[in-house]
Amino acid sequence: KTIAVVGCPFSGGQPRVGVDKGPIHIVEAGLLTQLKELGWNVQFDGHHQFEEISAANDPPIGKLKNPRFVSKVTKAVAQVVGDHAKKGKLPLTIGGDHSLAMGTISGTLDTYPDACVIWIDAHADINTSDTTDTGNIHGMPVSFLLGLGSKVPEFSWVKSSLRPDRIVYIGLRDVDAGEKRILKENNIKAFSMHEVDKYGIGKVVEMALDHVTPNRDRPIHLSFDVDALDPTVAPSTGTPVRGGLTFREGHYICEAIYETGLLVALDLMEVNPSLEDEASVKQTVAVGCSLVRSALGETLL
Ligand code: ARG
Ligand code: MN
Ligand code: MN
Ligand code: MN
């Protein structure tokens, strides 16, 4: 089986420079060789080159910042991810900021309409164009995929066919008031850090899988925002929030999803190598690589 690595040096969904360097650092750290050692064929056609749209030509639409740039890039990513998936390859998208998931999950849904999404994050990323405080689109991809909020014509290409019962969150601890309302109104299942503390990660992952794929038969798209991990574990990220997943909890999630045999697409997002000191960057990049290896079959024994 083949992993198709999609390197996405993109930061337009949020304001901090550097997250576009995430995929370059992760590939340079040797991830592709590591995946080959796990027995995968690895296809990597180089990092995507996204043609910048100058800020002057991309004024906000409502509150949305860089809307045309984000739309153009994520649409291209949807195409690439969808093409790989249709050829039976497993797309591994390395970001870049989490707005990219609008593209990756659109590509997955285009190929596997009955797919479910497991979203690992400190944040729910489910603001709509109406509820967002920041206007940063990396805080909104889920609402577009679910078709919530006022329609934004610029994003009409996004696959908005994801059903609210086909997504589940693990790791949440910084959810905006409007997002809490959206989660409740749409009955969206979320395991915050409170539930991780209460039940333990093993039980939480089992309950999460029971929710989105009770018969263990639906294709799974795993979207992993590295800020789900505690900042002591993954410091180099744009919106760190204390009280996060431990190193093992993060890896356990990946291992357990691999074990289902249902994984069809994987995202690793929000590694920002220009934040914090050199040791922190190295640590965050290494953790990113090892999360990916765990999701793709690395075992401890
Ligand atoms: N909720 C905040 C916002 O909407 C933070 C989102 C952080 N998202 C992320 N992908 N790191 O701006
Ligand atoms: Mn996040
Ligand atoms: Mn917040
Ligand atoms: Mn996120």
Image (cartoon, grey):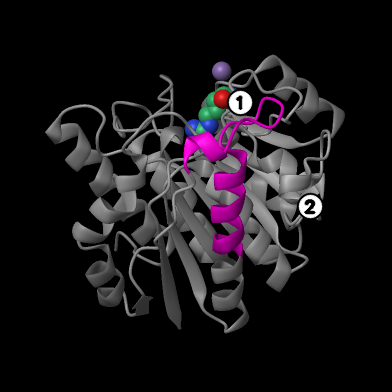
Q: Main secondary structure of the magenta part?
A: helix
Please name the amino acid that badge 1 sits on: Gly
- The spot of residue 76 in percent (x, y) is 56, 62
- The spot of residue 270 in percent (x, y) is 41, 40
Element carrying mark 2? loop
Query: Is 164 situated left or right of 282 in this image?
Result: right
Residue drawn at the location 33% of the way across and 53% of the way down: 23
* Image quarter (top left, top right, bottom left or bottom right) of the C terminus: bottom left
Q: For residue 64, which quarter of the picture?
A: top right
171 or 107: nearer the viewer: 107
Element carrying mark 1? loop
Residue drawn at the location 25% of the way across and 39% of the way down: 273
The residue pinned by badge 1 equals: 135
* Image quarter (top left, top right, bottom left or bottom right) of the N terminus: bottom left
Q: Is residue 208 magenta?
A: no
**Residue 193 visible in the picture:** no
Query: Is 37 situated left or right of 69 in this image?
Result: left
Q: For residue 37, which quarter of the picture?
A: bottom left
Q: Relative to 126, does residue 110 appear above or below in the rendering? A: below
Query: Is 189 situated left or right of 93 in this image?
Result: right
Q: What is the spatial separation of the Cα atoms under label 1 and label 2, in whole angstroms? A: 20 Å
Span colored in magenta = 54-78
First in residue order: circle 1 vs circle 2: 1
Q: Is residue 74 magenta?
A: yes
Q: Relative to 34, does residue 56 appear above or below in the rendering? A: above
Determine whether the beta carbon of the residue marked 1 sits less than 8 angstroms from the nearest atom of ligand 1.
yes
Q: Residue extending furthest front?
A: 56
Q: Relative to 164, does residue 244 appear above or below in the rendering? A: above
The residue pinned by badge 2 equals: 160
- The spot of residue 106 in percent (x, y) is 67, 59
Please name the amino acid that badge 2 sits on: Ser
Residue 65 — which label? Answer: none
